[in-house]
Image: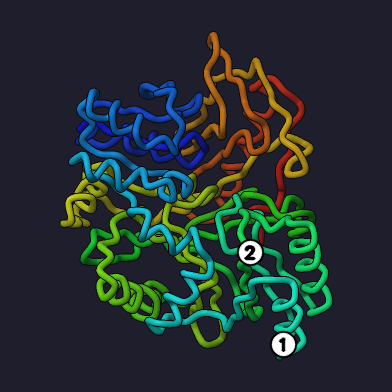
Amino acid sequence: MRILVVGNGAREDALSWRLAQSASCDALFATPGNAGTALRGTNWDIPATDGKRIVERALEEKIDLVVLGPEVAIAASVGDRLRDAGIAVFGPNRSGGRLESSKVFSKRFMERHGVPTAKAAVVHSLATAMKALDEWRGGGVVVKADGLAAGKGVVVCKSVDEARGVLTEWYSGNKIPGGGADVLLEEMLVGREVSVFALADGRAMVPMAAACDYKRAGDGDTGPNTGGMGSYSPPQGFPADMYDQVRERILAPVLRGLLAEAEAYIGVLYCGLMWTENGPYVIEFNVRFGDPETQVLMPRINGDFAGLLKSCADGAMDLSLATTSAQACVGVVLATSAYPRSSTPLSGLNPDLSLPPGAQAFWGGSSLVDGTVKSGGGRVLTVTALGDDLANARANAYDAVKTLAGRIGTNDLTYRTDIAKF
């Protein structure tokens, strides 16, 4: 197969790395891609949201399968355009993408179809927001902007007064992340967070793997929220029947709801869950693989991963094509020192990411220029390693971090030292 991956982050680098090892992959392309995808395939200079040009080039290159990476491509109807052109796509149409692109739509969908989730109120202005908070019953408030906001649209407020301050700033200064006027106010759930990734072929939805990530910039979950500073898989400390509970309580009603609303959902469904004393509740859905979770999931996948995704795209999921290893994997993100306050571009970086067997590193937003790497800054690399157990994987990952930190050609990188530390 000739395969195209849409996107340019470490998630897409990890997907490309795994797809390139599949028996059914004959040629690999990425758009716009990054320094990592350039080393194992061909990058196209087309933005991830430019569906018209992606379709034209995909037809020229006789692409057999397109794997959609970022949510912005899905929201821009790239999947719809490709399917209309007769090209197989792993990733939902724009309508299915509303489970992520609109927090309000997603909440209403869950309420309609009995998916366990936090109680919530939808507000449309500062006046309606203040009225809702005057009537709020309970402790903290999770304030969520309705639209896509690149991970910056959710604020966890420990009190109603804190929520009032956030909403006043958003509405008074016209600063609602992602734009629009709708905001979701949710009750704060108590438990442990876990992300479960399910594959879907339009008729079935099956859990594939799970991971836990670290969103805060500093050790001990301190500092500002980021796009993710590390992750590990499989999760620890959850029930042995975790996947069975997710399948029954979350995926089954979601699938029934999608089919009832005539939505043939194909791709991956990222279930961001809070595991409470009453079982799993949905915090949010994402309609694509996560970042940095994908970077620790892909090393655990064995077999023909490309063939598995193509079977989903064709509406006939074949789980026998690829399996998930029992090994653990830990990933550590190396970011520029000012991240997430700012992203300082870096240039002249060493593209040599060779590491011992079982360890792998994936480039974030970057390009390969005259044999060196130019990075957009922010999250520059995700360094991962496998191990027989989580402790072994963690030790291997930090050994790999130390190896690369002195090799890539900059001292302006920082990372958390407590990923997967218990």
**Residue visible at 39% across and 76% down in the picture:** 250
**Residue visible at 61% across and 72% down in the picture:** 184
Q: CA distance from mark 2 to mark 1?
A: 20 Å
309 lies above or below 377: below
- Res 85 label: none
Query: Residue 257's spot in the image, x, y percent?
Result: 32, 76
Left or right position of 70 against 185: left
Q: Secondary structure at mark 1?
A: loop
369 lies above or below 80: above
- Between 210 and 369, the one lying in front of the other is 369
- Res 136 label: 1
User: What kind of residue is marked 2?
Assistant: Ala
Quarter placement of the N terminus: top left
Residue 344, visible in the rendered structure? yes
The numbered mark, 2 or 1, whose residue comes first in the sequence reads: 1
User: What kind of residue is marked 1?
Assistant: Trp
- Between 219 and 116, the one lying in front of the other is 116
Specify the quadrant of the image occupied by residue 372. top right
**Residue visible at 28% across and 76% down in the picture:** 256
Query: Residue 155's spot in the image, x, y percent?
Result: 70, 65
Q: Secondary structure at mark 2?
A: loop
Residue 304, visible in the rendered structure? no
Query: Residue 360's spot in the image, x, y percent?
Result: 49, 35
Q: Label 1: how many residues lie within 10 Å, few (<14), some (14-19) or many (20+)?
A: some
Total of numbered circles in the picture? 2
- Res 181 label: 2
Quarter placement of the C terminus: bottom right
311 lies above or below 125: above
